Amino acid sequence: MKYAIVIPDGAADEPQEALGGKTPLAAAKTPVMDAIASCGIVGDANHVPENLPAGSAVANMSLLGYDPMVTFTGRAPIEAAAQGIVLDEQDWAIRCNLVTIQDQVMRDFTAGHISTPEATALLQTLNEQQSNENKQWTPGVSYRNLLICRGASRPWPFDADTRTTPPHDLTDGRVVDHYPRGAGSDFLNQWMRESVALFDVHPVNQQRIADGKPPATNVWLWGQGRRPQLGLFADRFQLQGAMITAVDLLRGLAALIGWQNVHVPGATGYTDTDYSAKGKAAIETLQSTDLVCVHIEAPDEASHEGNLEKKIEAIEAIDQKIVGPLYESLHSMNDFRILICPDHPTPVRTKTHSHGRVPFTMAGSGIPIDTSSTYNEVSAEDSENHFIAGHTLMERFIGG
């Protein structure tokens, strides 16, 4: 049996007046996803418990079959795993966004999708000016970076009561009331303040301003946590898996559960990603493993920008260039199952992640056929397949 999972990140949404009351998923032309719905089942799942943050870390952990109420410790340690960073018991990882804040308003939580070389240069300056053997600014991809705090010789005061806010939740909003608070927040706020002065005169920002691009005004720290304890996917489901994604968070989850990470040239983690390359890589990867998971960040990024048209284009590209070729290839195999499911809703209206159910469809060997003929939020709500505890959806997908 071969298994394929496609995660269109943040694709779930609300009815849009501009679309005659349809959601972006319902308005998009998705003939392949609809065909899968017609040959299998449609339903919805809640991947984010109400008392946990509505973010991709919690949601994707649940989607991959792990109960976030038991296993979630924070987003940053998952991303650290993606970079091969080993955290000891007393270490903390903290997510570091490069952002653009002007007049205390979060103008851009990506600093204009700053390039990785530019981000690396800025973080190098932080390491040089804030020298500390227990603290290391670690470049990632573009605006997505990490701060690693080692605690062997000096325990850090962070704990479960340390509160931080994801910068994408503050788009176009005032940040004054959303700086870190609670245990250890003095350190976080100090490091954020110090970055402002260093970045203000940095050659990277001077060049960005000259080029008409938004500067990275400072770092924004959030998503802190210690190393999570996740069991291997193969031990639970007796399947070997592989992940295709351009996002460190998903790479980290894959590493922690024992999956192979497949690098795809042209995969950017944005709306300009090479959808076709991801589809081809998924087909090739399935030749040598039991399960492949393709994660596409594009719908989520479009939502964060409040761009309805771009979100629909992303959903249609996923259907045409990833789901289509993959589904066709699966039919050449004797036994297969395919699952399409976003991680969480990201409404275009709010430009941020939210709690709530997301629609899924699955089909293939041993999967019953219900009465659904389309895949969207409405058909999912009308179905009889509702997974209140989203992490149990994987058991249904694997077990049939």
Image (cartoon, rainbow, N blue to C red):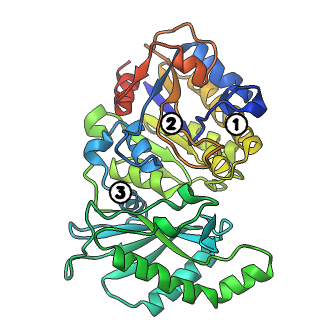
**Residue behind mark 2:** 286
Position of residue 227 in the picture relative to residue 218 (left or right): left
User: How far, Cα to Cα, is label 3 from label 2?
Assistant: 31 Å
State which tag comes first along the sequence, 3 or 2.
3
Mark 1 nearby-residue class (10 Å; few <14, some 14–19, many ≥20)? some
- Towards the viewer: 323 or 314: 314
Q: Position of residue 262 (x, y in %)?
A: 51, 51
Which quarter of the figure has residue 83?
A: bottom left
- Name the secondary structure under disc 1: helix
Element under disc 2: loop
Amino acid at dot 1: Lys
Measured in 3D between alpha carbons, the distance from the residue under mark 2 to the one under mark 1, in whole angstroms, is 17 Å
How far apart marks 1 and 3 lie (CA) works out to 33 Å
Tell me, for residue 74, which label it has, or none.
Answer: 3
Mark 1 or mark 3: which comes first in sequence? 3
Relative image position of residue 336 (x, y in whole percent): 48, 22
Residue 231: in sight, yes or no?
no
Query: Image point 35% across, 81% down: which residue?
Result: 135
Give the percent coordinates (x, y) of residue 104. 59, 72
Residue ID at (34%, 52%): 256
Q: Quadrant of the C terminus?
A: top left
Give the structural element (helix, strand or loop) at label 3: loop
Instruction: Determine crowd level at label 3: few under 14, some 14-19, many 20+ residues with C-alpha closer than 10 A.
Output: many
Q: Is residue 226 above or below residue 210?
A: above
- Frontmost residue, 303 versus 63: 303
Residue drawn at the location 27% of the way across and 70% of the way down? 91
Q: Residue at x 73, y 30 (%)?
A: 28
Q: Amino acid at mark 3?
A: Gly
